Amino acid sequence: MTTRAAVCRAAGEPLTLETLELRDPLPDEVLVEIRATGLCHSDLLQMEGSNAPFPFPVVPGHEGAGVVVACGSAVNSVEPGDHVVPLSIPECGTCAACCGGKTNLCEHFYASMGRAESPFSLNGKPIAAYASLGTFAQHVLVKEMNVARIPAEVPFDLACTVGCCVATGVGAVLYTARVEAGSSVVVIGLGGVGLNVVQGARMVGASRIIGVDTNPEREEAARRFGATDFINPLALDGDLVAAVQAMTGSGADYGFECVGNAKLSCQALEMVHPGGGVAVIVGMPPEGEHLPIPPESLFLGRTLVGSFLGNVKTRSQLPLLLEDYLAGRLDLASLVSHRLPLERINEGFDLMRRGESLRTVVTFPASQ
């Protein structure tokens, strides 16, 4: 079959709309018609050539939602017509990681990310699928362990956000840091992921939630999602770390770095108090960056931990986030600031670069 897709031919080039060939599903694969996909900063990094392991040309996109069209002969957990979210991290349900409580990194994760053969091609030449998904295409082929069935009543343009943005942010609170009610929290970077850290902290009953961003227009959104305070570092007379420490006493209970910046990760560690404060690296740092952390910062009892996709076990826990949405506990509607057709996808990334969007979602019409 053929499908429309936005393709990045080389690092730094804009996306081009192309008609690609897509092979038939293997026995353990699911064919999904994508109905909506979010634009993530990770996609931008790939398009700019910062994600070295992924080749060009490539179909970016890893935050999608859609409908199952067909299943391979060995698939039994979903069927045609099911609403699903394709997953960048699989959950096989049987390996030590899936059965344990420490990590969401299923042992099949690295194999699925580096899938030898992409299902996309053009004129006999392969076109890579970013994160083994490529949701900037109207149809994708994914392993059964890389797809989560979701409630049909959730609109696709909202459901897609849980595939990365929401899971990464809310999950970092629920499953990585395990923030307790009454805690103080500081969140550095109030893009889509940071705002979901904010609302995750609100959901668990954090008493003080300090949002930090250099864009003053993010204050309104941060407060809407649950922030009690806002700091613009550019408007400070003094040091950001000192400002947070002054607001919280000896430091916050939890700090989340949601930008992907080594210096800010170190600052997040200094913002939490000695003797139990926890700093979480949520943002994806550029490849090759190092953290210049003074050993005494950790020796005094602070903890620095990484969080990949919020430590969410994708097939079993991601649908629970949509149950939270349906119950009114999780705000997805306020997150999506722009909706565009595939033909205008490059405009969405322009909005991202200028800091003018919270989350842009590209929508696809249903196939006839």
Image (cartoon, rainbow, N blue to C red):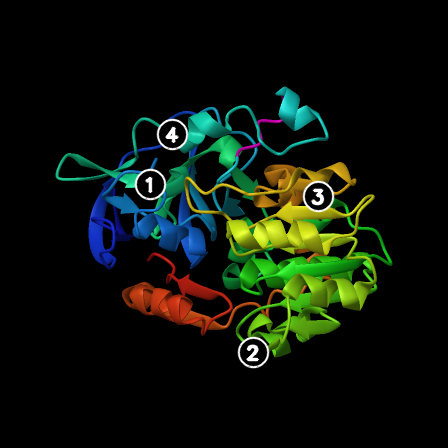
Q: Amino acid at mark 1?
A: Ala
- Looking at the magenta stretch, what is its main secondary structure? loop
Could you tell me if the residues under marks 2 and 4 are in contact, i.e. CB atoms within 8 Å? no
Q: CA distance from mark 3 to mark 4?
A: 36 Å
Q: Is residue 160 visible?
A: yes
Residue lying at the far right in this picture: please name it: 182
Quarter of the image for the N terminus: give it: top left
Q: Which residue is mark 4?
A: 114
Q: Nearer the viewer, residue 262 or 82?
A: 262
Q: Nearer the viewer, residue 193 or 30?
A: 193
In primary-sequence order, the first of circles 3 and 2 is 2
Q: CA distance from mark 1 to mark 4?
A: 10 Å
Disc 4 element: loop
In primary-sequence order, the first of circles 1 and 4 is 4
Q: In the shown orientation, is residue 365 left or right of residue 301? A: left
In the image, residue 77 lies at what x, y percent?
A: 57, 33
Q: Nearer the viewer, residue 72 or 105?
A: 105
Q: Which residue is mark 2?
A: 216
Could you tell me if the residues under marks 1 and 4 are in contact, i.e. CB atoms within 8 Å? no
Q: Which residue is mark 3?
A: 297
Q: CA distance from mark 2 to mark 4?
A: 40 Å
Instruction: Point out the stretch of residues depicted in magenta.
Output: 90-94
Q: CA distance from mark 3 to mark 1?
A: 41 Å
In primary-sequence order, the first of circles 2 and 4 is 4
Could you tell me if the residues under marks 3 and 1 are in contact, i.e. CB atoms within 8 Å? no
Disc 2 element: loop
Q: Which residue is mark 1?
A: 129
